[in-house]
Amino acid sequence: MIAIPRNEEETFKRKFVSKKMLVSLIKKLENEKTPVTVKEDNNSNLLIELKVNDSKWFAVLGSSWRNKKYQAYIDIDEYRREVRFFDIIKEAEFVAGSFEQVGERFFTRGMMIDTKEQSRLLGIRSDLSIGEIYKYKFDPETIRSMIKKICNDHGWDFKRVLFR
């Protein structure tokens, strides 16, 4: 008797779907419950975007803003029945303070392990009222795990990659 490793045994049990069907299943993530957009991209098969934060407010010397966006690039290899997943977080912020004006741009990409974020800002809103400007909780693992489940349940191997 030949022993089959557990992961290969599970591969035989999975139901395989075509690339077109897999893309349509992933596109179903784009609904009212999940604020993501799924687009077909030129460089990649799919691009998933989530606007985590897009806020504007008034600081001492003028308006300030902060943008944070999560992007996931999905390359689907039909020959290997493999889905390669690459994610990136892009942030940009500008704050006009009393003695300085600070602008920052930075991004995180590659393998983000156990990244969870929660943020809240109180201040003067752009309509000149005082209160909460933004409040969010963000965990990229939620989107990643949804994509992984779709792929694994339909016969595709899910692999995270460091580079596109």
Image (cartoon, grey):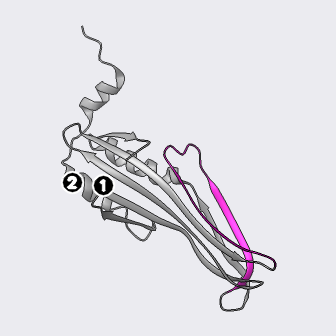
| Residue position marked by numbered label 1 in the rendering | 44
Q: Residue at x 42, y 55 (%)?
A: 72
- Answer with left or right where residue 97 lies relative to residue 144: right
- In the picture as drawn, the residue positioned furthest to the front comes out as 100
Label 1 element class: loop
Q: Quadrant of the N terminus?
A: top left
Q: How many marks overall?
A: 2
Q: Quadrant of residue 48?
A: bottom left
Q: Position of residue 46 (x, y in %)?
A: 31, 57
In this view, 64 is above or below 28:
below
Say whether residue 55 is left or right of residue 16. Answer: right
What amino acid is labelled 1 in the image?
Ser
**Vertical comparison of 125 with 15: above or below:** below
Q: Residue at left 77%, top 78%?
A: 97
Q: How far apart, in angstroms, are the residues tagged by discs 1 and 2?
A: 17 Å
Q: Is residue 66 magenta?
A: no
Position of residue 94 in the picture relative to residue 81 (left or right): right
Q: Name the one closer to the observer, 111 or 93.
A: 93
Q: Label 2's element?
A: helix
Question: Magenta stretch?
Answer: 99-125
User: Which residue sits at x=33%, y=19%?
Assistant: 5
Name the residue: 48% across, 46% down: 110
> Horizontal and vertical percent for residue 145?
45, 48
* Image position, residue 44 (x, y; %): 30, 55
Query: Mark 1 or mark 2: which comes first in sequence?
Result: 2
Residue 95 as seen in the image, left or right of residue 87: right
Q: Which mark is residue 21?
A: 2
Q: Is residue 89 above or below residue 15?
A: below
